[in-house]
Image (spheres, rainbow, N blue to C red):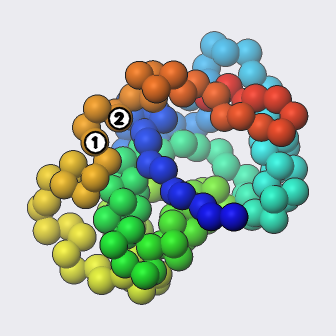
């Protein structure tokens, strides 16, 4: 099996400081602990780590970094580090210093990442600022769907 990492902004309106999951899903009558329990179990079944997330963060910079990292042998490790930083450790992916550290830990060169290059240069097109054009509003799961 091969894995292809695909970057897309699911909630591009999320501020850099993030939102609590309660804020993100306000007015949607969702049982967040139950959804997280379901996600935790699905991750466990797939052998993936999963922490106790309390917030969502604007991941645009992390997506750009991921796309940029595809050009290096360490790109897959970089994606794993980004995944773990968010889904395991609950870290803010809008934090530029965090992303530079993750790139360094993965073995990617860190100097060229933030030299003022406009974000679209690394390959996440501007028109993906919303998942709506692609009709992405849920994540498919083995036993149902989870609304996002």
102 to the left or right of 111 = right
How far across and down, in percent of the image, does residue 15 sit? 38, 38
Q: Is residue 85 visible?
A: no
Q: x, y percentage for residue 118?
A: 15, 53
- Say if 94 sits above or below 135 in the image: below
Left or right placement of residue 19 versus residue 27 in this view: left
Q: Nearer the viewer, residue 129 or 100?
A: 129
Residue 127 drawn at (x, y percent): 28, 32
Q: Disc number at residue 128?
A: 2
- Quadrant assignment for the C terminus: top right
Q: In this view, does 108 lie to the left or right of 57?
A: left
Residue at 39% x, 53% y is 63
Classify mark 2: residues with Cα within 10 Å, few (<14), some (14-19) or many (20+). some
Q: Are marks 2 and 1 in contact (CB under 8 Å)?
A: yes
- Placement of 35 over or under 137, stated as above or below: below
Q: In which quarter of the image is the N terminus?
A: bottom right
Label 1 Cα neighbours within 10 Å, binned few <14 / some 14-19 / many ≥20? few
Q: Which residue is drawn at 37% across and 78% down?
A: 72
| Residue at 63% over, 13% down | 27
Front in this rendered view, residue 28 or 41: 41
Quarter residue 138 falls in:
top right
- The residue tagged 1 is 125
Q: In this view, does 87 lie to the left or right of 15?
A: right
């Amino acid at each position: 099996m091969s894995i292809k990492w695909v970057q897309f902004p699911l909630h591009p309106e999320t501020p850099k400081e993030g939102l609590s999951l309660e804020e993100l899903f306000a007015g949607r009558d969702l049982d967040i602990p139950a959804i997280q329990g379901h996600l935790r179990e699905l991750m466990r079944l797939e052998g993936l780590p999963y922490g106790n997330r309390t917030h969502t963060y604007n991941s645009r910079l992390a997506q750009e970094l991921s796309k940029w990292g595809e050009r290096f042998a360490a790109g897959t490790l970089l994606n794993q580090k980004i995944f773990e930083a968010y889904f395991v450790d609950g870290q803010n992916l809008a934090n530029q210093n965090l992303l530079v550290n993750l790139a360094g830990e993965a073995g990617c060169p860190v100097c060229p990442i933030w030299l003022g290059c406009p974000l679209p240069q690394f390959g996440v097109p501007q028109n993906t600022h919303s998942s709506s054009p692609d009709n992405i509003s849920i994540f498919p799961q083995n036993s149902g769907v989870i609304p996002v």
